Image (cartoon, rainbow, N blue to C red):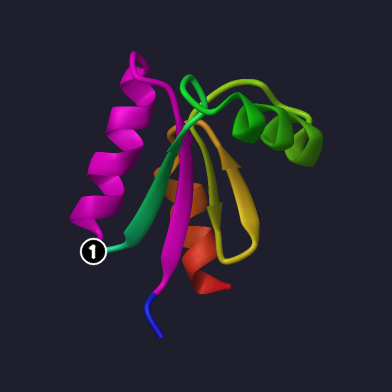
Amino acid sequence: MATIATVYTTSTCPYCTMMKDYLDEQNIQYREVNVQHDQQAAQKLVETTGQMGVPQTELNGKWILGFDPAAVQDALQG
């Protein structure tokens, strides 16, 4: 089964772009949720993680805050 991530972003976040580019380079499929346009998703994200910053990425049940390639690799390892 393919690994699929969810990346929470905003339209103007350079680190969000870096995270999406990194996932593309690693051939990891992802779904993008732009919390700038989806206030309900933004609220749920804060309730779930306690963090307001982006990007936040859920990958294999683990949360990655910011652009953190090492954390992506850790999440892929299980």
Relative to 74, 51 lies left or right: right
Which residue is rendered at x = 56% and y = 52% of the image? 58
Which residue is rendered at x = 61% and y = 35% of the image? 41
Residue type marked 1 = Asn
From this view, report whether residue 18 is shown above or below residue 2: above
Which residue is rendered at x = 71% and y = 26% of the image? 51
Q: Let me know if residue 30 is in the magenta part.
A: no
From this view, report whether residue 62 is shown above or below residue 48: below
Relative to 29, 61 lies left or right: right
Residue farthest bottom in this picture: 1
Q: Quadrant of the N terminus?
A: bottom left
Tag count in the figure? 1
Q: Let me know if residue 14 is in the magenta part.
A: yes
Q: Nearer the viewer, residue 9 or 74?
A: 9
Relative to 40, 18 lies left or right: left
**Toward which corner of the image does residue 28 lie, by quadrant?**
bottom left
Coordinates of residue 18 in the picture (x, y in percent): 29, 32
Residue farthest left in this picture: 25
Which residue is rendered at x = 37% and y = 55% of the image? 30
Label 1, secondary structure: give it.
loop
Coordinates of residue 64 in the picture (x, y in percent): 57, 44
Say which residue label 1 marks.
Answer: 27
From this view, report whether residue 74 is shown above or below residue 71: below
**Residue numbers of the magenta segment:** 3-26
Coordinates of residue 38 in the picture (x, y in percent): 53, 28
Q: Quadrant of the C terminus?
A: bottom right
